[in-house]
Image (cartoon, grey):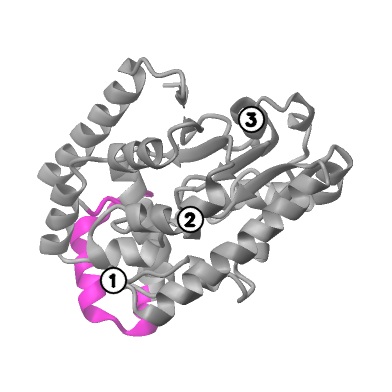
Amino acid sequence: MIVLHLGAHRTGTTLFQKALANDRETLLSKGISFIGPENIRDGKLRGLMPRQAKLTPYQKTAAQNAAQKLAAMLEREQSAGRRIILSEENLIGSVRHNINTKNIYPNFRRSIKILRPVFEKVDIFYLSIRSLEEWWNSCFSFAIQRFLRPPSDKQLDQIAHNSAFGWRTMIKALREAFPTSRIAVIEFGALTSSPGLQLAEVSGWADVSDLQTKQRVINRSVPPDKLWDVLAERSDHLGLARLARKSSGQKLTLFSSLGSNLLREAYDRDLAWLVGREDERLRFIAAPH
């Protein structure tokens, strides 16, 4: 059995991956192989994660070669009789690319097309989602700490409008590309701090529910005053001015009231669609509200 966790970014993925990596030997003793970012991002498989909308012949060849290597890795583990959990959110895109294109994983369908020959044997695709307003603000908090100037009002409005179809586009693309596989969609806050229980819930593997988690949060979004310090150290005066107009309190809130409403409405449509679907291949695990 193969379970493939595709993220998304900023939904507890790093905590999930760290917990499984720390318990890798325990998992192996149960007959489970964990394949995580350290296996995918080592250079040999980087071709799996192109960001361009259109690939050059060289990039297409690199992607095909990387896909073959990953398929061989999965085949070895299956031949050994092991269950497999693969977790790598960069297979579908990156925070930087989402921000640069002002879209939610705009090349998702293309990425799935590249990966389709590898993942036709996947039993469960596993996608974690989050309120779009919280998710975009978390993405910006992460990016501003590392490389980004705070966005302009125009950029934020474009993002809010471009996010109208929410997470549904990605989920539908998975269903179309892998019609015999199951899809589990789990909402941020549903067992996020307990990776073992989360994996058990999604996969049905009861023997992983007791995995130990040393940390409860990794890469938490930082409050605006910490971002202010980062921008001040960079001498980014325009960034400081943008942040000063947008942020108050302990949470980063970049969007206008109109943008926030658009994002909330889009996510409400996501939830209504997920809850209302009568599809035995699609399972939604909601967070407590």
Query: Image quadrant of residue 177?
Result: top left
**Mark 1, residue position:** 54
Query: Image quadrant of residue 229?
Result: bottom left
Rendered position, 123 above or below 157: above
Q: Return the disc, 3 or 1, that comes first in the chain's sequence.
A: 1
Question: In the rendered image, which quarter contains the C terminus?
Answer: top left
Amino acid type of the residue tagged 2 in the rendering: Leu
Q: Return the disc, 2 or 3, that comes first in the chain's sequence.
A: 2
Q: Of residues 65 and 94, which is closer to you in this image?
A: 65
In the image, what residue occupies the spot 33% across and 36% down?
A: 172
Q: Of residues 224 and 182, which is closer to you in this image?
A: 182
**Mark 2, residue position:** 115
Magenta region: which residues? Answer: 231-254
Helix, strand or loop status at disc 1? loop
Crowd tier of the residue under label 2, counting other residues whose Cα lies within 10 Å: few below 14, some 14–19, many 20 or above:
many
Query: Image quadrant of residue 199?
Result: top right
**Left or right of 120 in this view: 92:** left
Rendered position, 96 above or below 193: below
Q: Position of residue 106 (x, y in %)?
A: 28, 57
Taking the magenta stretch, the answer to whether it contains residue 246 is: yes
Rendered position, 281 above or below 237: above
Q: Position of residue 132 (x, y in %)?
A: 30, 42
